Amino acid sequence: MIRTLTATAALIAATPALADKAGVVETYADIAHAGYEDSLTTAQALQEAVTALIEEPSAEALATAKQAWLEARVPYQQTEAFRFGNPIVDDWEGKVNAWPLDEGLIDYVEGGAVEAGENRYAGLNVIANESFTLSGEEVDASEITPDLLQDTLHEADGVEANVATGYHAIEFLLWGQDLNGTDDGAGSRPWTDYAAGEDCTNGNCDRRGEYLQAATDLLVSDLEWITQQWAEGGDARTAVTEDPDAGIKAMLTGMGSLSYGEQAGERMKLGLMLNDPEEEHDCFSDNTHNSHFYDGLGIHNVYNGRYLRVDGSVVEGDSLADLVAEADAEVGDALSRDLDNSVLQLAKLKAAAEAGFAYDEMLARGNAEGEAIIMAAVDALVAQTRSIERAVSALGLDQIGFEGSDSLDNPDAVFQ
């Protein structure tokens, strides 16, 4: 099950003092490896549930697969703090967590196949078509394979919305479209979309199962690869540990860019400005409140050098918190407080959603209570970014250009 706030409270414990740079980046690499390894094992559990759904479709099998997907998101979202500062992660991440997606590329959508803006393939519906023309070439899709999804369909024509792989493609295939707007409710795909013979709904149930299996198998193989990169001797680990100063800078880059442009901006304030549930990170499953919370917790993990694994064990060691405190105690205390506050505000958002105030509803135009909950978290993330900038200076590092967002830096541009 998704961890409760009580179960995650232990993650905010203090870490030992007297860190050194080499030890700090070793802890960072250890946490990365553990987080990706947990992401892999939970994705393998999802793979088993998907196989069971396809082999013997039922309402129970679909519910089990959905729960496995939700559980797989918990460790993965905490690894997003390793983005932005690590090129190996950045080059890979789009395979597994790209969003938002034009779901009509994959399967049937409400109102039938239509182009979406500049995306001519937004209504391609690969599941319904065994062949189609893509970028001027005829594609044989009679068999839906991981290679077809990854090499042919994903980001076809260079359009980022053509997301054919990863967690969100799988999410859509399990939940279907969320057609509730800013009312409560997730997607409601029937289990019979995977049924055989006359019980099949919406056609092409066998191919839908092929797509779901291929996407899930690909997710597992992609997570196997990234886990290896952070193991002893792996390229990602070596890149941050062979030069501790560069490793420290990678840590701060990931923390600041995820805090500011990515989470506070693109994932939270933008959707609120547009009052658009399509901008939710986990929009089909209505799991966005958890997605936001575990992203914030991942930043906290990196700074404090401590990660609670899925099996209950803890990975911890020399921390960036100790390093900053040694350089400037006042800056370190301020950043620790700001990080604790951002986790607290995200926890409040998570608690509200779990109590029945759906994130969809929070985004509705004129919902002052929802706007206040989201903006409290946005403001906390922005504040912690400013503290991260001060930590960069305290450590004597060159200033880092964190990822930005028009929603924060140039709001008028959002509506142009």
Image (cartoon, grey):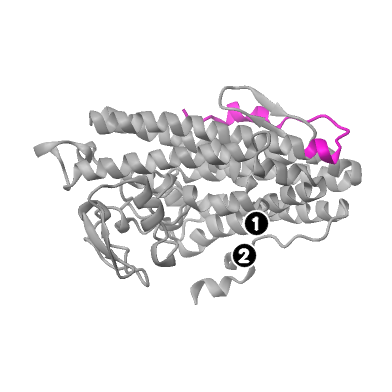
Residue 342 in the image, given as x and y percentages of width and height? 66, 45
What amino acid is labelled 2 in the image?
Answer: Leu
Other residues around mark 1 within 10 Å, as few (<14) / some (14–19) / many (≥20): many
Q: Earlier in the sequence, mark 1 or mark 2?
A: 1
Q: Pick whichever, 321 or 150, lies toward us.
A: 150
Q: Are marks 1 and 2 in contact (CB under 8 Å)?
A: yes
Magenta-drawn segment: 1-24
Name the residue type under label 1.
Tyr
Q: Residue at x 37, y 35 (%)?
A: 66
Q: Judging from the image, what secondary structure is the residue with disc 1 in?
A: helix
Q: Which residue is mark 2?
A: 408
Picture residue at 15% right of the left edge, 36% below the top: 196
Number of numbered labels in the structure image: 2
The x, y position of residue 59, in whole percent, is 25, 31
Q: Secondary structure at mark 2?
A: helix
CA neighbours of label 2 inside 10 A, class few (<14), some (14 to 19), many (20+): some
3D distance between C-alphas at marks 1 and 2: 8 Å
Q: Is residue 281 left or right of residue 140?
A: right
Residue 29 percent across, percent down from the top left: 70, 38
> Does 376 sit above or below residue 404?
above
Residue 9 sits inside the magenta stretch: yes
Which quadrant would residue 30 be assigned to in this image? top right
Q: Which residue is mark 1?
A: 260
In the rendered image, residue 84, in percent from the top left (x then y), is placed at 64, 54
Depth check: give the residue in front, 101 or 271: 101
Which residue occupies 66% across, 55% down? 257
